[in-house]
Image (spheres, rainbow, N blue to C red):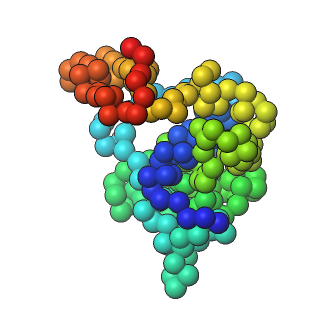
Amino acid sequence: MNKISRRELLRSSAIAGGAALTVSRASSWTLFAPASASAQSKPSMTFPTAPRERLAVASWPFRAEIASPTNEYHDKTKPGLDLRDWAVRIPKEFGVNGVEPLSAHFPSTDPHYLESFRKAIENAHMHVVNIPVDNQFCFFDPDPANRKKAVEITAEFTKSPADVLDSYFMTERDYYRDRNGCVAVATIQRPIDAMQSEGLIERPVSISDYLNMSYLPFPCSA
């Protein structure tokens, strides 16, 4: 497996990892939400008001400790920590109940292991905020072969149909990234406005005041 940097992971993989919670609601929500939620037709979540309850700890900084066949960064000189054991120790060590496990840190994605992971999380009164999919291929690559591989990897982990993902995921119908690096100001502004209206930030923020796209190699439309 080719090594990827944290920057590359965030750029081409972590966003794709949103599929673990958004694209495949039926599978991931059922596995990682409380058991009582499985009877609901769709997720029903209340955003926490206490600032500390909004925090989560990612498994990426602990990659040297976590044992998994797909975790190439595990330090073999260390005993190795199962993802379940890592997760349930987070509240005691960091005082937060949210975790963000990387897909590569799951030793298995079979139903039995995922159910045991869900139960461990539930018994510890914790929750999963996101599951970034470790994907060395980029959805935005102009080479169709690379996009195909990225779709296949994400589909496999999220248990979602590859053809459905490919039809909209990271295209102009979804959160598409312009290959020239142009930023859709209105798209960024909407969640900022929502956060301000919910009291998560104190004052309105105009994203256009902080963007300078003159450094990009090609001009962007207004």
Q: How many marks?
A: 0
At 73% from the left and 27% from the top, the residue drawn is 167
Snapshot quadrant of residue 204:
top left
Residue 205 in percent (x, y) is at 25, 21
Residue 189 in percent (x, y) is at 36, 20
Residue 54 in percent (x, y) is at 37, 39
Relative vertical location of residue 198 with respect to residue 57 in this rendering, above or below: above
Relative vertical location of residue 129 with respect to residue 48 in this rendering, above or below: below
Q: Can residue 38 be seen in this snapshot?
A: no
Quarter of the image for the N terminus: give it.
Answer: bottom right
Q: Is residue 200 left or right of residue 8?
A: left
Q: Nearer the viewer, residue 185 or 96?
A: 185
At 63% from the left and 49% from the top, the residue drawn is 137
Relative vertical location of residue 52 with respect to residue 7 in this rendering, above or below: above
Q: Can residue 3 be seen in this snapshot?
A: yes
At 71% from the left and 39% from the top, the residue drawn is 144
Q: Is residue 113 left or right of residue 138?
A: right
What residue occupies the far top of the structure in this picture?
222
At 39% from the left and 14% from the top, the residue drawn is 222
Q: Nearer the viewer, residue 71 or 21?
A: 71
Snapshot quadrant of residue 183:
top left
